Amino acid sequence: MLVLSRKKDESIMIGDQIELKILSVDGDQVKLGIVAPQNVKVYRSEVYESIQQQNKESLNISKSLLEQISKKNI
């Protein structure tokens, strides 16, 4: 893990296209601005983990349910 110190109005570049800007620091809360291309998806970690969990759960469809769906489509 790379650890960097930044102050308000300073930024960090990730590659050539992603910039993290420190917008404000208030006590233990830091507000970040993220400048990235539209094709780069940016999520809070808890949202990302929830999406990953939902994706895993969707893969656990029972065989009988799949068979029922395929019979209706025939």
Image (tube, rainbow, N blue to C red):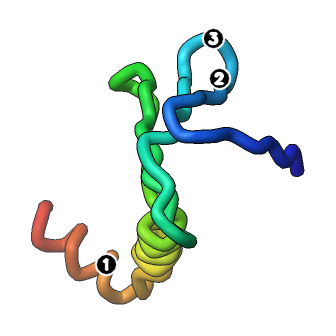
Image height of 58 relative to 73, above or below? below
Amino acid at dot 1: Glu
Amino acid at dot 2: Met
Cα–Cα gap, marks 2 and 1: 49 Å
Amino acid at dot 3: Asp
**Residue 32 seen anywhere in this rendered image of the structure:** yes
**Callout 2: SS:** strand
- Packing grade of label 1 (10 A; few <14, some 14-19, many >=20) is few
Mark whose residue sits in front, 2 or 3: 2
Residue bearing mark 2: 13
- Packing grade of label 2 (10 A; few <14, some 14-19, many >=20) is few
| Residue 26 spot, x, y in % from top left | 46, 63
Q: Quadrant of the C terminus?
A: bottom left
View extreme (right): residue = 1
Q: Which mark is residue 28?
A: none
**Callout 1: SS:** helix
Residue at 11% over, 71% down: 72
Residue bearing mark 3: 16
What is the count of numbered marks? Answer: 3
Image height of 52 relative to 63, above or below? above
- Packing grade of label 3 (10 A; few <14, some 14-19, many >=20) is few
Residue at 34% over, 24% down: 38
**Residue 59 seen anywhere in this rendered image of the structure:** no
Name the one closer to the observer, 52 or 43.
43
Image height of 73 relative to 28, above or below? above
Q: Earlier in the sequence, mark 2 or mark 1?
A: 2
Mark whose residue sits in front, 2 or 1: 2
Q: Earlier in the sequence, mark 1 or mark 3?
A: 3
Residue bearing mark 1: 67
Name the one closer to the observer, 40 or 73.
40
**Mark 2–mark 3 CB contact (< 8 Å):** yes
